[in-house]
């Protein structure tokens, strides 16, 4: 997972907002029950709401990392849509299952009973709410990261990438890089014959290097324009990028326009 530097305030604000939302919902449930002629102790709806929020907050770092890893604004958008649809389903299943178990545990602790599978029995109802929550979360988080972006660019070294290896820090000059390639949770910085492994998402690196003379030619590959000697097109619309040192890199037609734009 990539690091979410600067995300502490976003997490804290989200937690505070969810807690206030839980209080409002708790009193709304109590009012609804009173209007229906039923009596309900405050602690029950409060437990329902807070267990839901606790599970959401526990999962937030995972889904924040997913958004950073598969940035919704980056092409190809169908891939991002599929990934985040899968993320929504995983979020809903984990949320509904975990909050049912948490409610059962709280009820058992006070000598009451709550069926841990009750939320799962109402999964469609819960899924609709989770779909809205997940979509809103992704939207707000994207806006937050966009808000942080100018600050990140202001403090980042404009001529080098900082690579950390334990207590050691290596600064790789951008002028020495030929291309950067995704490698799982890392990227490979290609300088000379031996690549340097750096823990970061390619999308994060692309945003960091915006305006520094690099262009994306593939979903897993970024190239320094000055290192390109030739571009050979293929009938499929894909292409081959030949570097000044003779090495060849495959390019995707989806990223053809950014490459050809001056």
Image (tube, grey):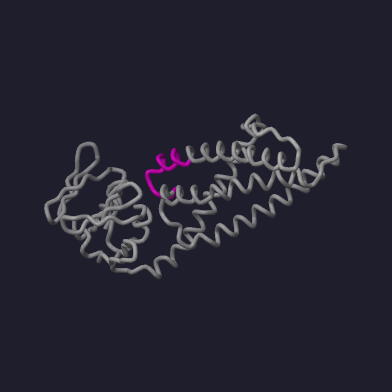
Total residue callouts: 0
The secondary structure that dominates the magenta segment is helix
Residue 44 x/y as whole percent: 76, 43
Residue 21 x/y as whole percent: 69, 51
Quarter of the image holding residue 119?
Answer: top right
Residue 77 painted magenta? yes
Residue at screen point 32% across, 65% down: 162
Note whether 203 is above or below 35 in the view shown: below
102 and 245: which is toward the camera: 102
Residue at screen point 73% across, 47% down: 46
Residue at screen point 77% across, 43% down: 29
Residue 13 x/y as whole percent: 60, 59
Q: Quadrant of the C terminus?
A: bottom left
Q: Residue furthest left?
A: 246
On screen, residue 25 versus residue 182, left or right, reads: right
On screen, residue 30 versus residue 94, left or right, reads: right
Residue 122 painted magenta? no
On screen, residue 31 versus residue 205, left or right, reads: right
255 and 117: which is toward the camera: 117
Quarter of the image holding residue 157?
Answer: bottom left
238 and 29: which is toward the camera: 29
Stretch of the chain drawn in magenta: 72-84
218 and 232: which is toward the camera: 218
Q: Residue furthest top?
A: 121
């Amino acid at each position: 997972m990539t690091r979410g530097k600067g995300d502490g305030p976003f997490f804290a604000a989200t937690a505070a907002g969810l807690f206030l939302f839980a209080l409002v919902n708790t009193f709304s449930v109590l009012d609804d029950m009173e209007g229906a002629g039923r009596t309900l102790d405050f602690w029950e709806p409060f437990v329902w709401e807070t267990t839901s929020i606790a599970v959401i907050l526990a999962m937030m770092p995972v889904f924040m990392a997913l958004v950073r890893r598969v940035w919704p604004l980056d092409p190809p958008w169908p891939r991002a849509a599929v990934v985040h649809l899968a993320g929504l389903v995983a979020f809903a299943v984990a949320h509904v299952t975990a909050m049912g178990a948490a409610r059962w545990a709280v009820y058992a602790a006070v000598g009451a009973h709550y069926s841990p599978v009750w939320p799962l029995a109402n999964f469609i109802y819960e899924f609709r709410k989770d779909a809205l929550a997940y979509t809103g979360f992704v939207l707000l988080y994207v806006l937050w990261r966009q808000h942080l972006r100018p600050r990140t660019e202001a403090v980042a070294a404009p001529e080098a990438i900082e690579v950390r290896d334990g207590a050691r820090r290596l600064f790789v000059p951008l002028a020495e890089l030929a291309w950067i390639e995704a490698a799982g949770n890392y990227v490979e910085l290609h300088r000379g014959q031996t690549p340097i492994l750096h823990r970061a998402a390619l999308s994060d690196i692309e945003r960091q290097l915006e305006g520094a003379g690099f262009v994306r030619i593939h979903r897993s590959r970024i190239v320094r324009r000055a290192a390109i000697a030739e571009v050979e097109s293929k009938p499929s619309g894909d292409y081959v990028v030949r570097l000044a040192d003779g090495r060849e890199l495959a390019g995707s037609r989806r990223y053809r326009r950014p490459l050809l734009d001056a």
